[in-house]
Image: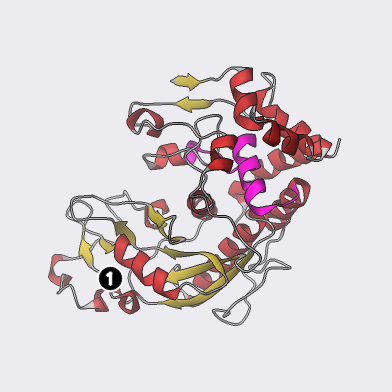
Amino acid sequence: MQTVRHSEQTLKTALISKNPTLVSQYEKLDAGERRLLNKAFKADSDLFGPITLHSESDWIISHPEAPQDFEQFFSDPYRKAPSPEKRSIYIQCIGSLGNTRIISDGYIKWLKGYCEAFFYGLTVKLLEPVPVSVTRCSFRVNDNTQNLQIHAGDILRFLKKKKPGDAFCIVGITMIDLYPRDSWNFVFGQASLTDGVGIFSFARYGSDFYSSRFEGKVNKLRRVSSSDYSVFDSYYTPEVTSVLLLRSCKTLTHEIGHIFGLRHCQWLACLMQGSNHLEEADRRPLNLCPICLRKLQCAIGFNIIERYQALVRWIDDESADTPGVSTEHSCEDNVNLPKPVEAFKEWKEWIIKCLAVVQK
């Protein structure tokens, strides 16, 4: 195992900058917020640790990238930020997310509530779910896994046409596996930062996807023409477990973070780290490191205490709906499924520690 460690001065510069304007901006933050963010470069911090690499296949080793500090983020001419007219994140479900309508609707609302807490200050709206056929996307059966896959680029073009006028971004979510081009095996997600659209699949986050017993395999006799979308009717969806919900929340917020202009983090253990495989994605924490947290705060303008409190409320609220979350085009009448948040309990304890630092 390899540990990626940066010096105190390197992390301090990445967080605060040496640009007098950005230093002044940092000094105007609330004292409690600065106390928490400064944990980025404190060697004895028990809140933010270094990145650990477990194999040569991990992202940082296999995909070398230049790191992005706060100053580079702030100065990026292509970075997009919400405006007073465009402060909504839209979620478009493609296909079913659960084996019943009630489970699917509950799952979508949990994701919606989580996003609204994570991107605190923005409104998250649901669009009516659509079947795969509406997108007119290309699809195939993967030769290796024998499961159905839909073309990510086609979905992005569909979403771009549907993007509402008040949208900062629109993201599609699906339980169907994705592929970006014929030569690729699969992709977890794909986004266009310029267009503010993204599509993300949670298919491989089910506990049985890599099992020989995976029920989503397509029998060769059922393989039909590329224009017959009936193959998606009643297509298999995995059980919505606490781990699946956690993985979905992690992927959705990571990818939307990219739309805000946050690149892959190479400073500390962070949600915005790249991941090359599921084991590495599971190692990635739910939280943003201080450097990436400052970037997101700069883009949205939230109060860190209020954001953390909203995340704790989302974990504590065991119903499908989150109080205060705006609903656009409700999928169905409100349901009251118990939210499977067992996998989030450790993260809740971490947030409470952060709140103690900020409110000290």
Give residue 173's position: percent from left, percent from top. 44, 63
In the image, residue 91 lies in the stretch drawn in magenta = no
Q: Dot 1 lies on which element?
A: loop
Q: Of 331 and 358, which appears nearest the observer? A: 358
Q: Residue at x 43, y 20 (%)?
A: 1
- Give the farthest residue toward the right: 360
Within 10 Å of the Cα at label 1, are there few (<14), some (14-19), or many (20+) other Cα atoms?
Answer: some
Asked if residue 290 shows in the view, the reply is: yes
In which quadrant will I find the C terminus? top right
Q: How is the protein colored in the picture?
A: secondary structure
Give residue 50's position: percent from left, percent from top. 56, 25
Seen in the image, is 332 located left or right of residue 47? left
Seen in the image, is 54 located left or right of residue 71? left
Query: Vertical placement of 64 versus 230: above or below?
Result: above
Give residue 60's position: percent from left, percent from top. 40, 30
Query: Vertical placement of 106 versus 31: above or below?
Result: below
Query: Vertical placement of 183 versus 30: above or below?
Result: below
Total numbered badges shown on the rendered structure: 1
Which stretch appears magenta? Answer: 282-303
The residue carrying mark 1 is: 137
Residue 6, by quadrant, is: top right
Q: Residue at x 41, y 39 (%)?
A: 275
Q: Residue at x 20, y 62 (%)?
A: 141
| Type of amino acid at the residue the image marks with label 1 | Cys
Asked if residue 353 shows in the view, the reply is: no
Seen in the image, is 268 located left or right of residue 158? right
In the image, residue 285 lies in the stretch drawn in magenta = yes
Seen in the image, is 233 located left or right of residue 2? left
Residue 353, by quadrant, is: top right
